[in-house]
Amino acid sequence: MVPAKEKIDLTLYPRAALLKAFRDREMPCFSVTSEVDVTTLVRFARTKNLKFFITMSYALSRAVNQIPELRQRLIGGELYEFERVDPGYTVLLQNNTFSFCDSLHMESFAEYYDYASRAIEAVKRVPDLAMEEKDHMFFITAIPWFSFTSFTHPYFAQYASIPLLTIGKHFPRSRNIVMPLAIQVHHAIVDGIHIGTFLDRLKETINDKTLYKGSR
């Protein structure tokens, strides 16, 4: 079920002037890349024999949903905020092409992991490149073959306000394991301060071991 959304009253919206300034730019999005310490999550996934991508996507989904600006969307020229946004993934296929995969945000890690695993296996059998209504989603792409210092996605005006997250190959640094994370967002809605808060919430989620209790 698509989560509920509420229209934002722009007369009470503190970023109304910024929304107007950036909404109709030819390229209104910006992308930033940051290194994320994923030591705790990598070790946890290895210990539990879990897929790192799904485990990481859970942390991303929790962090995204804690930032109101990352749940806001421009739809038909109007600004809305969803009560929840769900992750969608790109899934590598055997012929080295990929499929889209719609998933669900869940608070329980065990339930999230199980649902995401089944959804990914389903699109491997029957690939999905449909572009039906996606405003209630955000997208996660994995580039596990190499690291990177910047990343930009193709621009699609209809879904420009959907955050696009890209994770790269993680690698050791000193005693830790770090991973590049790029996030592309619409500047009419999201500013650098919101990205900073998101990265703070992500760090907390990665290192909060209580969230992963009850996992297999």
Image (cartoon, rainbow, N blue to C red):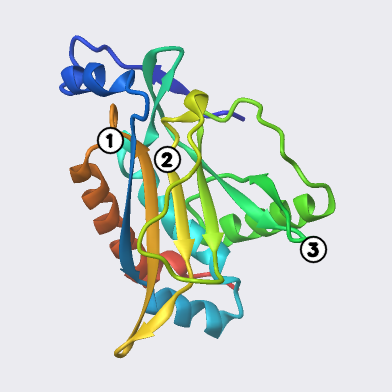
Q: Give x and y (percent) for residue 198.
A: 29, 50
Residue type indicated by callout 3 = Gln
Residue at position x 31%, y 90% in the image: 175
Identify the residue under disc 1.
Answer: 190
Asked whether the beta carbons under mark 1 and mark 2 sit within 8 Å of each other, the answer is: yes
Residue at position x 78%, y 55% in the image: 124
Residue type indicated by callout 1 = Val
- Image quadrant holding the N terminus, namely top right
Identify the residue under disc 2.
Answer: 163
Identify the residue under disc 3.
Answer: 94
Residue type indicated by callout 2 = Pro
Mark toward the viewer: 2 or 3 = 3
Residue at position x 27%, y 23% in the image: 22
Classed neighbour count for the residue bearing mark 1: other residues with Cα under 10 Å, few (<14), some (14–19), many (≥20): many
Mark toward the viewer: 1 or 3 = 3
Q: Earlier in the sequence, mark 2 or mark 3?
A: 3
Classed neighbour count for the residue bearing mark 3: other residues with Cα under 10 Å, few (<14), some (14–19), many (≥20): few
* Marks 2/3: CA–CA distance: 27 Å
Q: Is residue 99 above or below residue 36?
A: above
